[in-house]
Amino acid sequence: MTGTTQEEVPEERLWVLHVDESSTTQGNVAGIVITSPQGEDMEFAIKFDFKASKNEVEYETLVLGMRIAQDAGTLHLLAYSNSQLIVKQVSGEYEAKEESV
């Protein structure tokens, strides 16, 4: 995956990643949808078996989605998340204050 902007990547080479998380009484779950340039969707549902905050789950989901997309042969990926904090951290606009213990 490269650091080019969406405007620089031809549409026929751009993959799209959507991630979302949800907390339930039974734990944290997340969804990943990766759309190929041809419009084919790969959908994944994940249940996390560890205790984590909403932001940690959203971040782990984004990283997992990026890894799946890379394994699928993605060179250019546009990622969407409903977590402003995660988006700004990944884009470099925010810095994490400290690592979780």
Image (spheres, rainbow, N blue to C red):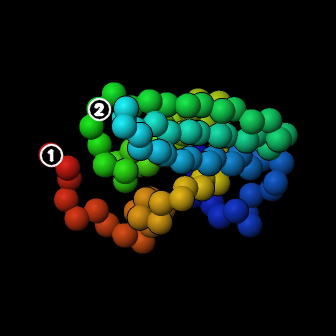
The residue tagged 2 is 50
Cα gap from disc 1 to disc 2, whole angstroms: 13 Å
Please provide percent x and percent y for residue 3.
57, 58
What is the secondary structure assignment of the residue under circle 2? loop
Q: Could you tell me which residue is drawn at 64 percent across and 54 percent down? A: 78
Quadrant assignment, res 96: bottom left
Which residue is most to the bottom? 93
Q: Is residue 63 visible?
A: no
Would residue 94 be found to the left or right of residue 71 on screen?
left
Please provide percent x and percent y for residue 5.
65, 64
In this view, the residue in front, 23 or 73, is 23
Q: Is residue 90 visible?
A: yes
Which of the two labelled residues, at mark 1 and mark 2, occupies the earlier sequence position? Answer: 2
In this view, the residue in front, 46 or 41, is 46
Q: Which circle marks residue 77 in the picture?
A: none
Please provide percent x and percent y for residue 28.
40, 38
Q: Which circle marks residue 101 in the picture?
A: 1
Q: How many marks?
A: 2
What's the residue type where badge 2 is placed?
Phe
Which residue is most to the front? 25
Q: Could you tell me which residue is drawn at 77 percent across and 47 percent down? A: 13
What's the residue type where badge 1 is placed?
Val
Would residue 91 be found to the left or right of residue 19 on screen?
left
What is the secondary structure assignment of the residue under circle 1? loop
Whether 88 is drawn above or below 28: the answer is: below
Quadrant assignment, res 31: top right
